[in-house]
Image (cartoon, rainbow, N blue to C red):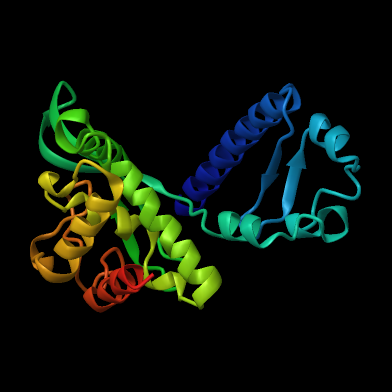
């Protein structure tokens, strides 16, 4: 009986996948834009005719190959490689405040995924992150300077990496955005230079790292978990920015 149940489950899963795959292929085959589908190893498992025409390749020379091998290696671009290899499969996650029934429930929606290096589970809340970031950037709070200052600091990081050999892993963009989010609104001045100086002064000399949270307010920003930042790394980055 157990084997029969497993066989039935496998058959149902295969049928579901077959139906889903047929639908996926239909969607991309009728699209007017170039599309390709990659497997977890970044090998091409499907492309549409628009892709073949646009990049002047054939099915025979495309499907089954690594995406970086396309066009005699023309797609082997460091920036594209970084973007693709940062993609992680994830699942919906719900942090329930209460659940009485389907009509009476409250939760914070997030995503759950595992790190590629250690396989440790990470839970994030992109919708809350976006909403809280938009609120922080509002005219009445930071005069729409929050996002601009985050961008300025990310550009400073790029300059440190490209011109000064700075280790980009020390200061992930997500953490930079989160720590700036924790800077009090009144530190965002009338101009960007003043605001940047205020932010650096607060982070390097006045803040209380143990009280800082991520933009979603669901995690503490600093700690030992894989979704948390190291205080020494943060200090190293912002000190380097101050010295630019």
Give whichever of 69, 168 is nearer the camera: 168
Q: Residue at x 17, y 64 (%)?
A: 201
The answer to which quarter of the image holds residue 169 is bottom left
Give whichever of 156, 61 is nearer the camera: 156
In the rendered image, residue 89, in percent from the top left (x then y), is placed at 48, 51
For residue 188, side relative to residue 20 (left or right): left
Q: Residue at x 48, y 54 (%)?
A: 88
Vertical placement of residue 169 versus 215, above or below: below
In the rendered image, residue 84, in percent from the top left (x then y), is placed at 59, 55
Q: Residue at x 26, y 40 (%)?
A: 133
Residue 93 in view, yes or no? no
Give whichever of 8, 135 is nearer the camera: 135
The answer to which quarter of the image holds residue 179 is bottom left
In the rendered image, residue 129, in percent from the top left (x then y), is placed at 27, 42
The answer to which quarter of the image holds residue 20 is top right
Q: Residue at x 21, y 49 (%)?
A: 181
């Amino acid at each position: 009986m157990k084997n029969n149940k497993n066989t039935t489950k496998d058959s149902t899963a295969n049928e579901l996948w077959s139906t889903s795959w047929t639908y996926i292929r239909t969607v991309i085959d009728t699209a007017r834009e170039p599309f390709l589908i990659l497997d977890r190893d970044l090998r091409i498992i499907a492309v549409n005719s628009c892709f073949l025409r646009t990049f002047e390749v054939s099915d025979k020379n495309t499907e089954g190959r690594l995406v970086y091998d396309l066009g005699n290696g023309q797609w082997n671009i460091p920036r594209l490689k970084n973007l693709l290899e940062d993609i992680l499969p994830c699942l919906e996650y719900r942090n329930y405040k209460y659940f009485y029934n389907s009509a009476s429930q409250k939760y914070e929606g997030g995503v759950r995924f595992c790190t590629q290096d250690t396989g440790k589970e990470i839970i994030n809340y992109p919708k809350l992150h976006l909403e809280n970031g938009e609120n922080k950037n509002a005219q009445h709070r930071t005069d729409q300077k929050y996002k601009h200052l985050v961008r300025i600091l990310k550009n400073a990081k790029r300059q440190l990496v490209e011109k000064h050999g700075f280790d980009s892993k020390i200061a992930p963009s997500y953490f930079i955005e989160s720590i700036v989010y924790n800077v009090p609104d009144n530190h965002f001045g009338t101009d960007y230079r003043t605001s940047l100086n205020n932010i650096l002064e607060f982070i390097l000399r006045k803040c209380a790292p143990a009280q800082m949270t991520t933009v979603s307010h669901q995690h503490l920003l600093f700690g030992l978990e894989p979704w948390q930042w190291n205080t020494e790394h943060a200090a190293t980055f912002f000190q380097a920015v101050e010295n630019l």
